[in-house]
Amino acid sequence: ECSAACDEPSFADAARRAAEAALRVFVQSDGSLRRCVRNGRGAAPGILEDYAHLILALTALERLDRSGRWLEPAVALAVHACRRFADADGGYSDTPADAPDLFVRARGTHDGAMPSGASAMAHALIDLGELTSDPAYAERARAALAAVSGRVAPWPAGAANAVRAVLRIVRSENADLARAAAVLGAGARAGPSASPSAAGSSPVEIYASCDRIA
């Protein structure tokens, strides 16, 4: 992202080398991630934030290169992440269901210096949906955000990355509505009984926290 913003190719080269190293060192033969490695060894399995942030790195490179080289491993990691961390309500827990040393599975939503795994995963799914044009990723992202919305809504400033993901989905849906309205508007203008106000219109919903303001 710095490479694109600053028009500095050396940043992109460093990112590619880092991604290649991460895929070579941390991805195991079965496609799962190791959390850390020392002297070529690492037994600790990756948690949700490891998968989500590596997917985000790969999708950022794919947006830059548009080569398909980074998209395949990103999709493969997403398959593993959904299999290991997804819950029945569509949300994502920080740890896998089969972790033997945990009494409960945490689901963090706080976005501090490090964004939460849940919010990072939502962005990763949105990225994959945009890059693959597969609507299933967007549906998974919506479900992931819906699952944590009860904790995010009372304190949105503490879950800023999740709120950003909601904004991305809203913008995408509004863009879809605008495109549909443009198509419908063009068809309406072509017809003999078209209403002048139909062209380019799109539905707007406004929600207020109270019915009346004194």
Image (spheres, rainbow, N blue to C red):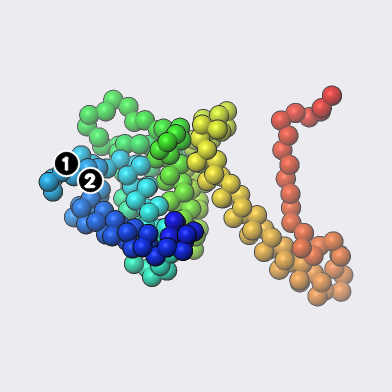
Question: Quick one: label 2, few (<14), some, or many (20+) residues within 10 Å?
Answer: many
Q: Is residue 74 above or below residue 144?
A: below
Residue 12 position, x and y percent, is 37, 61
Q: Is residue 131 above or below residue 142?
A: below
**CB-based contact (under 8 Å), mark 2 and mark 1:** yes
Q: Kindly identify the amino acid type of the residue bearing the numbered disc 2.
A: Arg
Q: Is residue 154 above or below residue 16?
A: above
Residue behind mark 2: 34
Q: Residue at point 38% right, 54% down?
A: 57
First along the sequence among labels 2 and 1: 2
**Direction from residue 128 to residue 177 in the image, left or right:** right
C-alpha span from label 2 to label 1: 7 Å
Instruction: Please tell me whether mark 1 sits on a helix, a strand or a loop.
Output: loop
Instruction: Please tell me whether mark 2 sits on a helix, a strand or a loop.
Output: loop
Q: Kindly identify the amino acid type of the residue bearing the numbered disc 1.
A: Ala
Q: Residue at point 32% right, 53% down?
A: 77
* Residue 116 seen: no
* Residue 113 seen: yes
Q: Is residue 11 above or below residue 50?
A: below
Residue 24 position, x and y percent, is 21, 57
Where is residue 198, by image quadrant? bottom right
Residue behind mark 1: 43
Q: Residue at point 22% right, 32% down?
A: 100
Question: Quick one: label 1, few (<14), some, or many (20+) residues within 10 Å?
Answer: few
